[in-house]
């Protein structure tokens, strides 16, 4: 397994620190741009993303180009030794383009075309928009191919959304013809259109899903979402064509999104597919720290899950934090600045999980329009004499001390399956607690048990290779695409431990239910049959009791909420039974021996303490390694990165209180942040972080 990755460009020697720089908004203020260069040095920053929304500045009229300002900025940044991540500006278009070519404007699901405005709202199919963006990208690549500051392309910005214009409808129909090989009978079967007399007799009858039209044919919805991902990727491929041709050595990324408030990934696009198209994964991370509804460590665990997911997209290759805020945002419900210390801690958390950059939105707060109160490195006061600036400079300083960490990764023995298509299908199903099925939360609650113990985890889709893991967990694996069950069987037969939960093995890739008993193709490996599922009201719970004799040695009772599935063992051993309701005495936890391995089935959605106890036993049984061997206080997390020769252990206190870990006798740790040996006790101030380096 690869452990040490090169940086994204030979000129990049350490962490990238800096962010979105929008001098195109400040061209009337040359003295401010001059001042930026001074402040950039003071902020210990070295990398800036330019031109993200610069289209109207580089092409103020159709075919009239104005690059002087960009030339100047790139030149000056190069002179001071900074790197440039150059963006293609397709994320927002100039007014002249919308005026001249209204077809580029996106059409909403209600079939209304948007007016010009906002951003991220173009049609992905429009030949005109494709032609204009490709042309401009070619000019940018020609102009800056050999520029000493250029280290990477930032293609567009946060691709997302969907267009329902006539061209997109036609493209969708073509996509379907291709997928179903022109066979309407195959489509009708996959979509189960006999239902409500929805049989399609001509591809021309098909429209994208709409609230005032068709939206309850779940396979239709799924195919539309797949099409939207494919069409967006196709648009992206069109954008990068000239970049690949003219700058083959320069790596390409596009910034993926996180999803607030649930703190998962963005659900509109299948990033597992998209990640194959980029050279390096980058994402924009905006957790709402200091909410009054959860502890910081609880949010930190969910953020850790998302970082791990983005790291796992390319098999452990370090990713980039393309955007985060040095302080607050302007779009949470309550916009709270990060408390002192949280900026360093949250930055270190990103690095601990595999980030090789801390980049901000944005360098300098704008004077007007919607983001003028969004946090930035340089505030309206315009100087370095404030807390946020000082904390940014501190991050820059710490990053320079952690340089050896760049390129290192982690190779977990545990993987949790989180899958976009499965999420789409679960969310769409008219079943269970209809609006609140909580698939992401189900994954995150299993993850938390490992996070608390500092056991590294990969978050992977069901398409990924399972063979390098000892433990594979598949919460709510509702959809099982072809070949997946066979790969799970093989994994277990070869000695792997597999854990599945309630509401697994229900539908195939077209959302058609498996016939002959759930969990469908997993029935054999799990050794159970799931007959029914009980959905509980919010305040309803059910208890289960562990049976007395089993090898895990779990005792007592535990509590289920939301879902209790009623299962029958078919070869599996019963480890716990329900104690209530008409299903009292039925199994709620089972294990099946299959080949060399074991497959557990957790039939109910349980409180977190179940996961903690259950997975502690599994961690012990499988001897899974954790990032740090000492016991961690609640809210202190450990993560590890390794480059094959050295381990870098991050210890992070997400509590706003002091915490202490005793160091065993004759042991000492070298802390890369304070550059000191730590003996006797590891003493954490609120939000403090240590990074220990040790030779392997
Ligand atoms: C991101 C976006 C940035 C900026 C930021 C504010 O989603 O890419 O341009 O708007 O949000 O938090």
Image (cartoon, grey):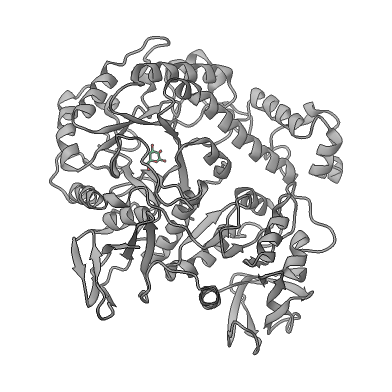
**Residue 548, located in which quarter of the rendered image?**
bottom right
Which residue occupies 59% across, 70% down? Answer: 538
Nearer to me, 290 or 617: 617
Which residue sits furthest left? Answer: 385
Which residue sits furthest bottom? Answer: 548
Question: From the viewer's perspective, is 253 left or right of 576?
Answer: left
Question: From the viewer's perspective, is 460 left or right of 197?
Answer: left
Which residue sits furthest top? Answer: 63
Which residue occupies 72% across, 37% down? Answer: 213
**Residue 604, located in which quarter of the rendered image?**
bottom right
Quadrant where the C terminus sits is: bottom left
293 up-or-down from 19: above or below: below
Q: Is residue 263 visible?
A: no
Nearer to me, 673 or 291: 673
x and y percent of residue 653 in the render? Answer: 31, 67
**Residue 196, located in which quarter of the rendered image?**
top right
Which residue occupies 36% across, 24% down? Answer: 54
Q: Is residue 612 visible?
A: yes
Which residue occupies 73% across, 46% down? Answer: 218
x and y percent of residue 596 in the render? Answer: 68, 70
138 up-or-down from 300: above or below: above
Question: From the viewer's perspective, is 7 left or right of 467?
Answer: left
């Amino acid at each position: 397994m690869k452990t040490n990755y090169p940086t994204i460009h030979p000129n990049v020697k350490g962490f990238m620190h800096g962010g979105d720089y929008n001098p195109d908004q400040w061209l009337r203020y040359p003295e401010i741009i001059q001042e930026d260069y001074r402040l950039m040095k003071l902020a210990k920053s070295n990398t800036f993303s330019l031109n993200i929304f610069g289209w109207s500045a580089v092409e103020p009229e159709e075919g009239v180009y104005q690059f002087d300002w960009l030339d100047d900025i790139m030149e000056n940044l190069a002179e001071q030794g900074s790197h440039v991540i150059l963006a293609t500006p397709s994320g927002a278009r100039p007014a002249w383009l919308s005026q001249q070519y209204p077809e580029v404007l996106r059409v909403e699901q209600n079939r209304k075309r948007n007016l010009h405005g906002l951003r991220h709202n173009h049609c992905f199919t429009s030949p005109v928009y494709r032609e204009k963006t490709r042309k401009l990208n070619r000019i940018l690549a020609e102009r800056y191919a050999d520029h000493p500051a250029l280290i990477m392309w930032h293609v567009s910005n946060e691709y997302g959304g969907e267009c329902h214009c006539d061209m997109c409808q036609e493209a969708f129909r073509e996509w379907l013809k291709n997928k179903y090989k022109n066979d309407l009978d195959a489509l009708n079967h996959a979509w189960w259109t006999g239902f409500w007399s929805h049989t399609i007799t001509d591809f021309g009858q098909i429209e994208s899903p709409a609230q005032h039209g068709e939206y309850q044919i779940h396979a239709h919805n799924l195919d539309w979402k797949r099409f939207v991902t494919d069409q967006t990727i196709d648009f992206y491929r069109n954008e990068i064509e000239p970049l690949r041709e003219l700058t083959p050595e320069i790596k390409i990324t596009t910034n993926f999104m996180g999803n607030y408030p649930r703190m998962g990934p963005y659900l509109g696009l299948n990033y597992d597919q998209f990640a194959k198209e980029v050279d390096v994964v980058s994402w924009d991370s905006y957790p709402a720290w200091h909410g009054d509804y959860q502890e910081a460590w609880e949010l930190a665990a969910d953020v850790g899950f998302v970082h791990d997911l983005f790291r796992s997209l390319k098999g452990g290759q370090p990713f980039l934090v393309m955007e985060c805020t040095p302080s607050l945002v302007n779009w949470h419900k309550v916009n709270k600045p990060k408390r002192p210390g949280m900026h360093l801690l949250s930055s270190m958390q990103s690095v601990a999980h595999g980030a090789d950059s801390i980049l901000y939105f944005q360098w300098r707060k704008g004077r007007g329009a919607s983001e003028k109160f969004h946090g930035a490195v340089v505030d309206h006061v315009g100087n370095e004499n404030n807390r946020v600036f000082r904390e940014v400079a501190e991050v820059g300083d710490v990053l320079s001390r952690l340089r050896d960490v760049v390129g290192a990764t982690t190779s977990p023995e545990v993987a949790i399956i989180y899958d976009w298509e499965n999420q789409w299908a679960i969310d769409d199903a008219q079943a269970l607690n209809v609006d609140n099925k909580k698939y992401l939360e189900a994954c995150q609650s299993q993850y938390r048990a490992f996070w608390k113990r500092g056991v590294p985890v990969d978050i992977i889709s069901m398409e990924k290779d399972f063979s390098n893991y000892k433990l594979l967990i598949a919460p709510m694996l509702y959809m099982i695409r072809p070949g997946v069950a066979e790969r799970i069987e093989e994994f277990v037969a070869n000695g792997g431990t597999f854990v599945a939960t309630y509401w697994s093995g229900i539908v195939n890739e077209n959302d058609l239910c498996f016939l002959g008993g759930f969990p469908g193709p997993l029935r054999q490996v799990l050794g159970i049959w799931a007959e029914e599922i009980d959905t509980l009201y919010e305040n309803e719970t059910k208890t289960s009791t562990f049976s007395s004799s089993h090898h895990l040695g779990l005792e007592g009772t535990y509590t289920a909420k939301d879902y209790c599935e009623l299962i029958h063992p078919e070869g599996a051993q019963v480890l716990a039974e329900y104690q209530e309701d008409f299903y009292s005495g039925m199994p709620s936890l089972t294990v099946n021996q299959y080949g060399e391995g074991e497959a557990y089935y957790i039939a109910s959605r349980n409180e977190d303490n179940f996961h903690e106890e259950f997975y502690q036993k599994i961690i012990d049984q499988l001897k899974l390694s954790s990032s740090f061997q000492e016991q961690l206080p609640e809210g202190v997390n450990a993560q590890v990165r390794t480059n094959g020769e050295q381990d870098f252990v991050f210890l992070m206190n997400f509590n706003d209180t002091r915490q202490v870990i005793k160091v065993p006798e004759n042991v000492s740790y070298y802390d890369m942040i304070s550059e000191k040996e730590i003996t006797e006790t590891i003493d954490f101030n609120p939000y403090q972080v240590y990074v220990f380096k040790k030779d392997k």
